[in-house]
Amino acid sequence: MSESEETTGVDDASQSVDGGRTETRGETDGVDERDETGAEPTTTDAQSPSTLDTDATGSETGEYPLRVENLRKTFGGIVAVDDASFEVERGTLTGLIGPNGAGKSTTFNLITGMHTPDEGRVLFNGEDITGLPPHRVADKGLVRTFQIARELSEMTVLENMMLAPKHQRGEALWRSVTPGVRDDVVRQEEELLERAWEMLDFFEIDHLAEEYAGNLSGGQRKLLEMARALLTDPDMLLLDEPFAGVNPSLEHRLLEHVHELREQGYTFLLVEHDMDLIMQNCEHVIVMHQGKVLTEGTPSDIKQNEQVVEAYLGGNV
Amino acid sequence: MSANNGGDAGPANSGRVNDVITRLREGDAGLILLVLGGIYLAYIISGVILGYQLRGQLNSIAALTFYIGVFALLALALNLHWGYTGLFNIGVVGFMAVGVYVMALVSKPVYTPGGAAQVGGLGLPLWVGVLAGMLAAALFGFIVALPALRLRADYLAIVTIAMSEIVRFSFLSSEFQQFTLFGNQVGFGGGSGLILDYTQPLEAFFRTFGLWDAYLGFVTAFGSFGPLNLNNPKPIVDSLIYGGVLLLFIGAYYWLLKRTGESPFGRVLKAIREDEDVANALGKNTNRFKIKSFMLGCALMGLAGILWLAVQGAVTPNFFRPRITFFVWIALIIGGAGSNTGSVLGGAIFAGVLYQGPLYLKNVLEAVLPQTNAPNGFGPAVAPIFQSLDPLPFVWYTLDSIRQLQLVIMGLVLIWLMHNRPEGLLGHRKEIAASIDLSRPTRQSSTAAADGGFVNGVSETNDSSANSGGQRDE
């Protein structure tokens, strides 16, 4: 198979992933209607990135899905995050950088509900999500990946993928076991399975589908984790050092995927150590230092900022 | 009465076993059949050596089936907790106790002064009692789980074992010996135990369907059937049939748990077992899943407890000592946590070999070896070995202590398993948590992408990714 053919193949796959997204969004709504157990209807069409591409609203919440206000968190005597405020613009790849101990990961954990902030607020799509448990935050369309890829090692890649879609009918125990009702569950699983395979194709890890996730290499795990996060139909993805420990060519591939997805309307917030990588790929960069937001702006602004050079580039390297 | 007749019960039994096995996976059906066949054969042979009459043979088969049944049921329920969800429950026996006692409370006849029973019950039908017992066990599980699930996994273990002891002491206490409920004088009988003086389960069962007379007719016919010619056949037929009922329950548990596991619900449970944070980050309310799984398992443990004790005539709190919990754990570990088929297998092996086996071995050896009196101490037992190279007194001494040694043997088996096969007999197997086959759907449209996958598939090294990424570098 020649190179050009393979590249087209990838393009095709990406389109079909896009198609799969819109299609399944409709289904998710359907599930919500049928779900009497009171699962909150979350992903409304107004929030979905693809529609917002076309009717970009003037409202601030539309432009800035994530807004962090005066966030503060202390652990014992250490102030990990100190009055941090920033916004992330829709459809961008925003980088969050800073030297070790700057509070990046804690900020991440505060946003995604792993930790509860002492002070401050987190707003997502105009809604106050401060202190919500992680699963509720994810439910609202704000999904994270982990610094060390946390695949579910004794589950196969496909099981990992099939886990992700939200509000599956079969997640209700009685539906999964009751004869007759289970047919609905099976039908939905068949639909989800097709999406899962499309996503695996898109990330080019479909040849690993039947493997235990624990047998994957570090880079492949990162791909799996991102693919899995995407299957939850997120609005925005928080990537915690997705390129750490990934070989350069795989890093290149991951970045390509991120850019492609960003063009489809996803919003990314990226925590990263690698200055060059951030400068080359992000539209907007937020610099944290000692728990505070030191500055933010375009990569070229940041490069010329003396404070940053001192705090980060000069001080640390 | 001939060996031939002993064989009659065998096929009848294995016929029922077959019912269950048809539900099991193809690959394991053979293994289970083989193991069960081997165990039953060993028991029949030892019966022959012991010179059992037909009645004795049937009795030993019924008892074996009973223990295989209850341990397989308990191992299946525990597998849902530990194998699927990773919940470290070492209070199994507590949930059994709650199930049994609540069942007794609901179904025992109303207190009549001067009756045999010290305390009465609510006098409701047995099936109501069974449902109430399961429900109570589930609700009790909920109460236990609520505080414990918020903590780290190990704390659940501590809470559950403490709770199972609290349950036992509560039923022992005089406070609950007698009390008034809905105007009825009821109670749990305290340390002196509780007589289960309701309609016997089999009778209740057959009466529900109006088949009791037919059953009695069958029993008489069975007893007087030509060569069998049993006096008073009812107890034997009862226990054989009850063993069969237990096997049917294994089938039902297996069916339910297999469906639970092979579903989106089971997938979330598996994810919780692997890494709860990940499941949470993907939007799953893991606490809710854990509580549901815990409650279902507790209800099944309650039912297993009821099935164990409902036919025993009486129940005392001290039956529910933690050792039974650990027996169930051994059964699960032998079979392999995470596999339902393995749980059944583990239950059967535990019951047949480790639980009942040593006693039969003792009986057989005692029948075979020349008779002497067992020495009454370790010294007199060992001395002849050195004095006259006569090992027999030591063997007799050992056999005499087989009850105590049983636990030692279990411990050794456990250590051996942990070292050599920690995943158990069938724990290594992939049981995919999905209601459908997850291989690529045939009506896949993007063939180009599939081809791309094929190219990767050929290179198949961990760095196949680097390979294709490199190509697009240019």
Image (cartoon, grey):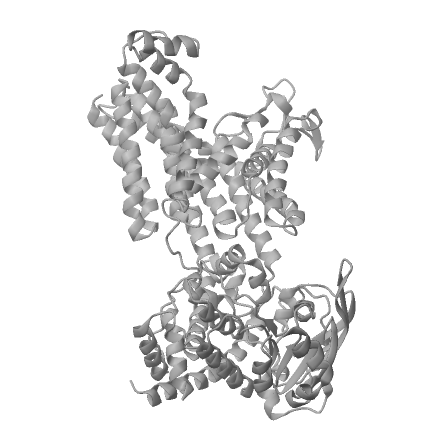
Rendering coords of residue B256 (x, y %): 45, 51
Image quadrant assignment for residue B168? top right
In front: A130, or B421?
B421
Q: Residue at x 54, y 75 (%)?
A: A28
Looking at the image, can residue A91 be seen? Answer: yes
* Residue A68 found in image quarter: bottom right
Residue B330: name its quadrant: top left
Q: Total label count?
A: 0
Which image quarter holds the C terminus of chain A? bottom right
**In the rendered image, which quarter contains the N terminus of chain A?**
bottom left
Of A257 and B128, which appears nearest the observer? A257
Rendered view: B235 above or below A43: above
- Residue B111 in the image: above or below residue B130: above
Residue A152, above or below A236: above
| Residue placed most toward the observer, B327 or A45 | B327
x and y percentages locating residue B393 in the rendered image: 34, 11
Q: Is residue B216 above or below residue B378?
A: below
Residue B214: image location, x then y, percent:
37, 34
